[in-house]
Amino acid sequence: MRMLAWTAAAAAFAVAAPASALPFDPELATHAWLATMGPEATARSNAYFEGGYIIDFVSTAISVAVAALILLLGWARGVRTWLEKTVKWFPLVALGVAFFVNLVSTLLTFPFAYYVGFVREHRYDLSTQTFPQWFSEQMIGAGIGLLIGSIFIAVIYLIIRAARNTWWVWGSAVTIAFAAVMGMLFPVFIAPMFNTYTPMEQSELRDDIVAMAQANGVPATDVMVYDRSRQTNSISANVSGFGATTRISLADTLLDRGSPDAVRAVMAHEIGHYVLGHVYSGLIMNTLLILFSFAAVHFGFRAIAKNERWGIRDISDPAGLPLIFLVLAVIGLVTSPLQRNLTRFNEQQADMFGLNAARAPDGFAEAAIMLSEYRKMEPAPFEEWFFYTHPSGWNRVHNAMVWKANEIAAGRLPPSPGGPPEGWVPDFVRDRDAAAPAATPPEAAEPSPAAPSN
């Protein structure tokens, strides 16, 4: 019987399309694409992305420390008491406490934000901003966050006061509705505060993108280009908004750095998000995470702040806002990996849609390599599961090469070799090599900034 089983398995394997039937080996083609980065750029990319792991945990620790400081020093309680004596009206009390806590948190975390958003980005040659430019945008973002965030928190406190035992259910619904409204307003009112959006110049590439969008049901008749180069040299694109505010946008850096096929591939991926309804599925998935987080806050708050600890009367008391922030930061250690996995699932779907819509696998591989400037290409499986919001660069290139090999084998693509075009290297490798000084004697050579630290 065992011999019969092995014979049947061998026959099934023989009937299946063997790897030799493909015009090239997708795995070898993938390694050829990744080899174009070279060891220095690969080490630099790995160091940047792996540093983000530490930043994630340090950010959580700082959030917990700041919230604990405001709570233990009684600052929020003092502001609440003063507002109750002056303005007296609860919505204004909640709004005032929320504004104060958000403002203090923003000020106390600014040095960390400065290091992460300015110093580190310049260290890895990813930022194009001077400090005044960066600081100006930070102030605009902080102002918007303080205003909108404080109003939102005040609304949540009104819900808590009206339904103390079930507020976490109603609060989750309001939070998702708020996120949907912000998603609709962002491309029209907020994004233009940071970048200038102009219609893409008439060209065959622009017509291809519009035709691809309309063929897949995206209600857009134009493509907008925004000046991402004023902040960074990294590439990006998106399809944002809802209904009448839907907008196809691509960064000027993508147009400047990518080939036409790379641009088509990226835009097809973004169109895939719209066609596959990821905005809506994302809202549903985030609703479950928010519901879990709010429930944990509701029941955890009662246990931590019982008997009016720290002068907090109950969960409807705005003086307890720092404690809510603290609990949410800790819960984020659990929900963040889940949220990343949900996002990566959608990104994987959009990748496959983009390959089939643009039919430009080499352009897709090129874009994945360009993104490797700040994304580690070959993570360990757990590393990708825990930290990645997108499929790893290796997986993206490999999927593109598998798609290409099978499409050629099926006769739906003209024959072409696997791997990158002869002599092709990423522009960030080519430009760095061109800017490198003449070789120095070994004893005088400086250590590579991309060399991994111990």
Image (cartoon, rainbow, N blue to C red):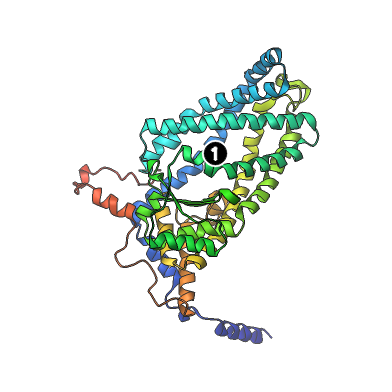
On-image quarter of the N terminus: bottom right
Q: Amino acid type of disc 1? A: Phe
User: Residue placed farthest to the top in the image?
Assistant: 85
Residue beneath label 1, please? 57
Please name the residue shown 56% across and 32% down the image.
Answer: 145
**Relative side of 328 to 55, left or right:** right
Q: Which is more toward the observer, 437 or 421?
A: 421
Please name the residue shown 81% across and 34% down the image.
Answer: 165
* Residue 280 sits above or below residue 309 on the image: below
Please name the residue shown 50% across and 39% down the image.
Answer: 55
User: Can residue 29 be seen by looking at this rendering?
Assistant: yes
Q: Which is more toward the observer, 43 or 339?
A: 339
* Residue 241 sits above or below residue 29 on the image: above
**Relative side of 392 to 318, left or right:** left
Q: Examine the image and state in which quarter residue 9 appears.
A: bottom right
Please name the residue shown 52% across and 60% down the image.
Answer: 213
